[in-house]
Amino acid sequence: MTSYENFGIVGGGAWGTALAQLLAAEGAPVRLWAREAEVVAAINAEHRNPLFLPGAALSPSLAATADLAELGDRNALLVVVPVPYLRAVLAELPASDAPLIFCSKGMEAESFAFPIDIARAIFPQRPLAVLSGPTFANEVAAGLPTAITLAAADPALAEALARALARPHFRPYVSTDMIGAEIGGAVKNILAIACGIVDGAGLGLNARAALISRGFAEMTRFGLARGAEAETLAGLAGLGDLVLTCTSSNSRNFALGQGLGRGTSAAALMADRRTVAEGAFSAPVVAAAARAQGIDMPITDAVARLVAGETHVADAVQALLSRPLRPEGR
Ligand SMILES: NC(=O)c1ccc[n+]([C@@H]2O[C@H](COP(=O)([O-])OP(=O)(O)OC[C@H]3O[C@@H](n4cnc5c(N)ncnc54)[C@H](O)[C@@H]3O)[C@@H](O)[C@H]2O)c1
Ligand SMILES: O=P(O)(O)OC[C@H](O)CO
């Protein structure tokens, strides 16, 4: 069975850097591609990434490069590029048959594609996997205990990759349900914005619990309609990540929602930011995909409209509360 030791990381944001540090912490050589020259320079010279993961001390065995071609000799690649930019970066990857493990959480505009769909279109033969779960980058970089879903259609690949990525404090659970893992991550980002809005607007903890619960119902409806397994959605990549990001302002999506809830416009909150809140990109995409399939996702729809500046918090809440009463199971 193949063993994967020689990882490359595509993307030098907070999560790419944290995963690189996870693998390099004991001195293993790890190579990371970053788009920003200042990130490459700071990782190589100071063993830090002040732009995206300030405060984390990185291993000297982690080397950064600005040249994607330098990842051509890696025997597995963790791809950690926000979904809106993913297709363009994948098109520049050097030729290789190394597995691609997708760690981004979102859905592409217009194509309605998840990372795995984008990759299949570009690399029909390459082995693919998804890594997703409740994982704040700063905690993983600090070596705090974390569990995550690692999904690949081929169970042998999932197990080999899980063995290669596991550390005493980092525990991957294997699955064959890639679409379930992708949908969990994409939809929880949107629901984290909703919970941030509830917090910022001072609507209380009952409202937050209702949103988590009814949001999970939306995630499940959308997921099951697209072939996800209920077990995955109720696991780390779905409910687990939903609970994490709906209850902490350490989540960029939750923090964006808090700003909206306090009355700041989405445009002002998004202006000049270097970090991503993927839910802001994904909300209109998931809302449109759900509408096209006739799937009811009122919370997702409300977040999409709030992010687009098409409605106000009070009106969105009123609209949600005045929906017809219905059985809980629907
Ligand atoms: N931060 C976390 O704790 C965490 C955890 C799990 C998953 N994720 C997911 O990982 C993905 C990456 O998030 P992050 O937190 O590492 O990012 P980040 O917010 O820390 O950094 C932004 C990233 O976007 C990249 N970027 C910006 N413009 C770009 C462009 N035009 N082309 C290519 N890349 C561009 C930057 O280079 C940088 O890597 C997202 O999908 C996110 O949802 C994040
Ligand atoms: O900061 P957020 O909201 O992008 O969340 C980060 C991770 O997805 C948490 O699992």
Image: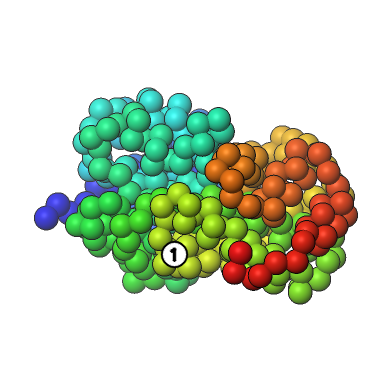
Q: Residue furthest bottom?
A: 206
Q: Secondary structure at mark 1?
A: helix
Ligand 2 within 8 angstroms of badge 1 C-beta: no
Q: Is residue 274 above or below residue 330?
A: above
Residue at image coords 38%, 41%: 116
Give percent across and percent down for residue 200: 81, 60
Residue at image coords 51%, 48%: 105
Give percent across and percent down for residue 29: 29, 48
CA neighbours of label 1 inside 10 A, class few (<14), some (14 to 19), many (20+): some
Give percent across and percent down for residue 77: 32, 43
Q: Is residue 10 above or below residue 321?
A: above
Q: Nearer the viewer, residue 160 or 52?
A: 160
Quadrant including the N terminus? bottom left
Quadrant including the C terminus? bottom right
Q: Nearer the viewer, residue 317 or 250?
A: 317
Residue 211 in view in this figure:
yes
Q: How many marks?
A: 1
> Looking at the picture, which amino acid does disc 1 mark?
Ala
Q: Residue furthest left?
A: 1
Give percent across and percent down for residue 201: 84, 60
Q: In this image, 265 relative to 170: left or right?
A: right
Q: In this image, 51 relative to 135: left or right?
A: right
Residue at image coords 25%, 43%: 127
Residue at image coords 17%, 54%: 3
Residue 53 in view in this figure:
no
User: Please, which colouring scheme is shown?
Assistant: rainbow
- Read off the residue under disc 1: 230
Image quadrant in which you'd find residue 80: top left
